[in-house]
Amino acid sequence: MFSSLKVKNFRLYWLGMFISLIGTWVQVVAQSWLMFQLTNSVFLLGLVGFLSSVPIFLFSLFGGVVADRMNKKKIILFTQNAFMLLAFLLALLTQMKLITPAQIMLLALLNGIVMAFDAPARQAVIADLVGKQHLLNAVALNSAAFNSARVIGPALAGILIAGIGMSGCFYINGISFLAVIIALLLININNGPRRNTGNFLLKDLSDGLKFIKDNRIILILISMVGITSLFGISYVILMPVFANDVLNVGEKGLGLLMSSTGFGALIAALILARLGDFKYKGKLLVFSSIIFSISLILFSLSKTYFISLIALILIGGASVTATGLINTLLQTLVPDEFRGRAMSAFMLTFAGFMPFGNLLAGTLAHIWGVSLTVLIGGITCTIFFIIINLLYPQIRNI
């Protein structure tokens, strides 16, 4: 289950990133609370989330080109230092009571721009750290770290906000980036030969997009992520309405609903890590994608709290399994010189499409209600994955 952690470089990197992720989730919760205190506006809360995500849609493809051209370790060192400085700036402005909603939105936008260049390099560097033999295990353990931090960070934030205030939370996040920076300074990453072709940035970007378009399997894998992000993941932002109006379980019930998704995701990540470099990745990908879609439909139709919890555990587990497998397959199938650009396309469809999926879901939920909105999303994903399975049986054989 933990075989990739035997590789010293990855062990240091993973531990540093895990600590940093906890700090990031602490800041996400504290920043939302601060914004709500300043404005009492749910719309502005959503706008902050949109501003932090939309740069990934706009700039992550360029981030992939940079990852293929430059030393990935240096890129990640630069972006982690930038994240740290932005966290300390937010902390200082909050401590001095100078913070304004406009400043929070600007800092969210700047964090999103840094993330657009950080994420492709972080995704692409995993193969350099562990090699392709341990790749699936490393991707799964990264997912386990993310989902563990998603549970630990918000819980810690609740305690810290009461104890040291919101500025203290932002300082802690800033300090947490030192864990990644120190880890990167201690490890030696084999980036392979430099691949700066001398082309213009747009030419390298065009070459990367052409490579993806001409490789049908890679294009299908990335499109599966895009469909999931547009139509499948937006149930999360509608969860408060499900808790309050559909299931009538209130705030305490909402917490358990959210945790059940994270619990399913964590269990699936650990199982995926245990499987390692197994043979039937394509079959498990198709199976988990369809289970995800059917579980969405079950959740949308459920009026019973227990059934909703079971459906959300399945949704969390199936989504992490499918995403982890696609991440691994992309990095395995793509040549080294295109890995950064392929992973930037993965991040574009994974994180860059989410704000638009959330916007679509919010609009449809306002017109038709949350249950019908999630049902439509689940049916759309089901039809798409079944068509992919029928038209491209080679996916099952990867």
Image: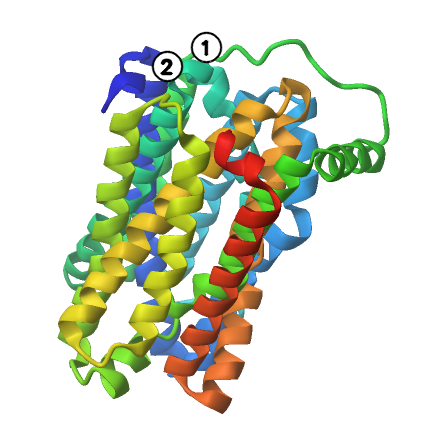
Q: Residue at x 81, y 37 (%)?
A: 206
SS assignment at label 2:
helix
Which labelled disc corresponds to residue 188?
Answer: 1
* Disc 1, SS: loop
Assess whether mark 1 and mark 2 are in contact (beta carbons under 8 angstroms): yes
- Vertical arrangement, residue 248 with respect to residue 125, above or below: below
- Near mark 1 (Cα within 10 A), the count class, few <14, some 14-19 or many ≥20, is few
Q: CA distance from mark 2 to mark 1?
A: 7 Å
Three-letter code, disc 2:
Asn
Q: Nearer the viewer, residue 201 or 289?
A: 289
Q: Quadrant of residue 154?
A: bottom left
In the picture of the structure, the residue carrying the numbered disc 2 is 9
Q: Position of residue 126 (x, y in %)?
A: 46, 24
Position of residue 260 in the picture relative to residue 37 (left or right):
left
| Residue ID at (28%, 61%) | 166
Q: Residue at x 14, y 70 (%)?
A: 306
Q: Position of residue 12 (x, y in %)?
A: 32, 20
Q: Is residue 234 above or below residue 9?
A: below
For the residue pair 336 and 298, the one nearer the viewer reads as: 298
Please give left or right for residue 365 compared with residue 348 in the image: left
Color theme of the render: rainbow
Q: Residues within 10 Å of mark 2 (few under 14, many from 20)?
A: some
Q: Quadrant of residue 67?
A: top right
Residue 157's disc is: none
Asked whether, in this view, residue 306 is left or right of residue 60, the answer is left
Q: Nearer the viewer, residue 87 or 144?
A: 144
Q: Amino acid at mark 1?
A: Asn
Q: Is residue 100 visible?
A: no
